[in-house]
Amino acid sequence: MGIMFKTEKDLVSCIQQTFTGQQFDLLDGDMQSVFTELNLGYGIADMVLVGHKENYPERKNFLAYFDISLLNLIEKEEVTFDDIVYITKSPEKKIHSSLESLMSEGFVIYREGRYFSHKKYANILTDSIAIEAKLKDWKRALKQAYRYKWFANKSFVFLPCENLSIPKDNIHLFKKYNVGLAGVSKDLGIEVIYEPISENPISGKMSIALNEHLLFQGNS
C-alpha cells in the first residue's frame, strides 16, 4: 500500500506536480499549459490541461462570457443596437461596454446603424483536458467531470489508486458518459484506467472562454 492522501488538496497537488514540466501524452499541441481551480461557469475544475499553438495573437481586451455571446450573435447576422437590447435583455451600459471592446479588437465594425462581424476570432487551443479529483466520492466526481465537457475535449475523474475498485466495477458509467478514469499514487504516479474519446466541446462559446483565459495567462 502506497502513501495515502489526507486531503483533496494533497491529491490535486500530487497530480499537478506529475504534470508540471512534463508532456502529458494524452494531450495534443505545440505547447502545454495548466490551470488550477478554473471556473468557467460550469463548476470549478480542479485542473485543466490545454494544448495550444505557440504564438499568441496581440490582444488588449479580455472577453468575458457576455462579450463572447455578443460576438457570436453578430457573427451570425448584422444587428442594430435595438436588436441587441431586445435579444439579450441586457442593460444598455453593459452592451455599449461590450461593443467597445469588440470594436477595439477589430472583431466588430459599425456601419450605417448596424454592427457587422469584421475579423475572425483566433482560437489557439488545440486540445483540452479537464480533471475532477476526489478522495472517494466517485459518483459526484463523475457528475462534475461530465459538466466540464461543455468546454473541454476530454474530461477525467482522478482518484487515489486505493479507492479505484468500486469505480472500476462501474466503468460502464464512465464509458456511457465518455468521462475518463485515472488513479493517482504518490509512489507510482498516474495510471489511466479508461481514456475517453476526444470530442468537440459541447459549447463553442465555453471553449472560447477557455481560450480567453489561456491568451491572457500567456500575455500576463
Image (cartoon, rainbow, N blue to C red):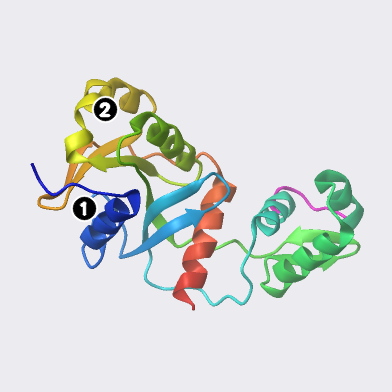
Check residue 25 in the rendering and tell me which mark sits there, or answer none. 1
Given residues 210 and 147, the one toward you in this image is 147
Amino acid, disc 2: Pro
Quarter of the N terminus within the rendering: top left
User: For mark 1, does the 10 Å Cα neighbourhood hold few (<14), some (14 to 19), or many (20 or more) residues?
Assistant: few
Residue 63 visible (yes or no): yes
Q: Secondary structure at mark 2?
A: helix
Q: Is 39 left or right of 67, judged from the image as shown?
A: left
Q: Residue at x 28, y 51 (%)?
A: 11
Query: Which contiguous range is marked in magenta?
Result: 75-80
Residue 183 picture location, percent across and down: 21, 41
Q: Residue at x 10, y 52 (%)?
A: 187
Q: Residue at x 10, y 46 (%)?
A: 2
Residue 83 picture location, percent across and down: 87, 49
Verify whether residue 108 appears in magenta: no
Q: Is residue 37 above or below residue 220?
A: above
Residue position for label 2: 167
Q: Secondary structure at mark 1?
A: loop
Q: Is residue 156 above or below residue 178?
A: below
First of labels 1, 2 by sequence position: 1
Given residues 110 and 6, the one toward you in this image is 6
The total of numbered circles placed on residues is 2
Residue 196 visible (yes or no): no
Amino acid, disc 1: Asp
Q: Residue at x 52, y 45 (%)?
A: 43
